[in-house]
Image (tube, rainbow, N blue to C red):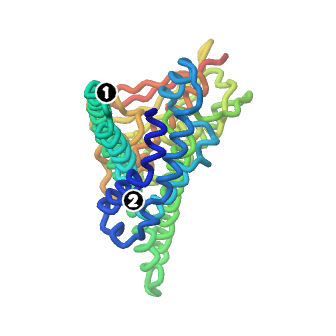
Amino acid sequence: MRFSVFIEENLDAIVAEWETFARTLLPAAKTLSGLALRDHCREILLAVVRDMETSQTEDERAAKSKQVALAPAASATIAAAHGAMRHLAGFELAQMVSEFRAMRASVLSLWRQSAESSTIAQAIEEIARFNEAIDQALGESVSRYSDDVTTFVSVIGHDLQGPLRAIEGSSEMLAKSEVEEKTRQEFLRRIGRSSRLMGHLIADLLEYARTGLTRGIAVARSPCDLRVACEEAVDVIQGIYPQLKFAQELSGDLQINADPPRIQQVLLNMLSTAVLHGDRNSIVSLNARGEADAVVLTVVSFGRPIPADVLQVLFEPLVRVPLAIPEPHMQPYTSLGLGLFIVRKIVIAHHGKITVDSSPATGTVFTIRLPRK
């Protein structure tokens, strides 16, 4: 009997095992109806049967097996609908994946039991063992992926709590009638700083969600003077950290084809990272130098060096380094671990290169080289 025909003739048994397994995945599943637990199981299996019975060339088989990104139409399939329903029901990603693993194991087990020839049964057993090993690896990867996503969400909540508490505390103090005008102005400045930090955190998060890990950041390049972007970046960072010292040195021809708002975003993230690793009593400097074929931007700070192992992954997403500044409302908005990841994406979009060195003698030095062409 052809495998696809066997599946179609044993749908009821397969679906029953799916329902039984789904009920064990989470406590809430015990209260779900059989219909809800079976969900789209029968339709998914029938779609699998149709796919198996559709003729396919070797090239088509290879392309489908190695496909990384699904076609847009994949979001409208029965399997996609099942994913949406399981999310609404409270299933975790790893639990939903385990349903498909269990379905495949059930089908192969039933097929092996029905095999008339011991040779066929042995072949099915070997296929089943291979699939089990692949599924185990898949489960471990999905579990770690899910844990990292949970950690990321926790990090976001933690980083937003600091400035939010600063705003809440300052608002409570401002409500008191006996607050002096000087103190009142300081609380207002703290609210402003905290609001800007939250805005930057959210902006970085949205940028990360939009671009993902593989796609680049779109830039709109046009003739511009980076002198303006540098001056505005220093002005903004000074407003966020008024008690710290910043300096800039601009020299040479800074005219270039670039996206000024994106470059300013890059400079703000680098300056904020410099604050993160710098000594509060030292000066954070921004230098821009025009060369024949490029504009070179550097941000320098002195303080605790960044460890060598961190330097190797500093521009990857979710890389976090212990803060040098303890006050919650003073924390740099790169603490999500996204700021420098976005910086690198923007620099690459400009066909540029970014490097970082950190030592007690030279300080922490970020260098960006943007080609004129």
Instruction: Check the image and report above or below for 84 versus 280.
Output: below
Which residue extends farthest front?
Answer: 116
- Element under disc 2: loop
Quickly name the residue at label 1: 120
CA–CA distance in space, label 2 to label 1: 37 Å
What is the crowding at mark 1: few (fewer than 14 residues within 10 Å), some, or many (at least 20)?
Answer: some
Q: Nearer the viewer, residue 142 or 202?
A: 142
Q: Position of residue 320 (x, y in %)?
A: 34, 43
> Residue placed at 51% from the left, 62% from the top?
195
- Element under disc 1: helix
Give the left or right position of residue 33, taking residue 220 as reference: left
Q: Quadrant of the N terminus?
A: top left
Q: Position of residue 357 (x, y in %)?
A: 36, 25
Quickly name the residue at label 2: 91
Q: Nearer the viewer, residue 272 or 108?
A: 108
Nearer-N-terminus badge (2/1): 2
Instruction: Check the image and report above or below for 160 versus 146.
Output: below
Q: Position of residue 333 (x, y in %)?
A: 45, 50
Q: Is residue 296 visible?
A: no
> Residue placed at 62% from the left, 12% from the top?
292
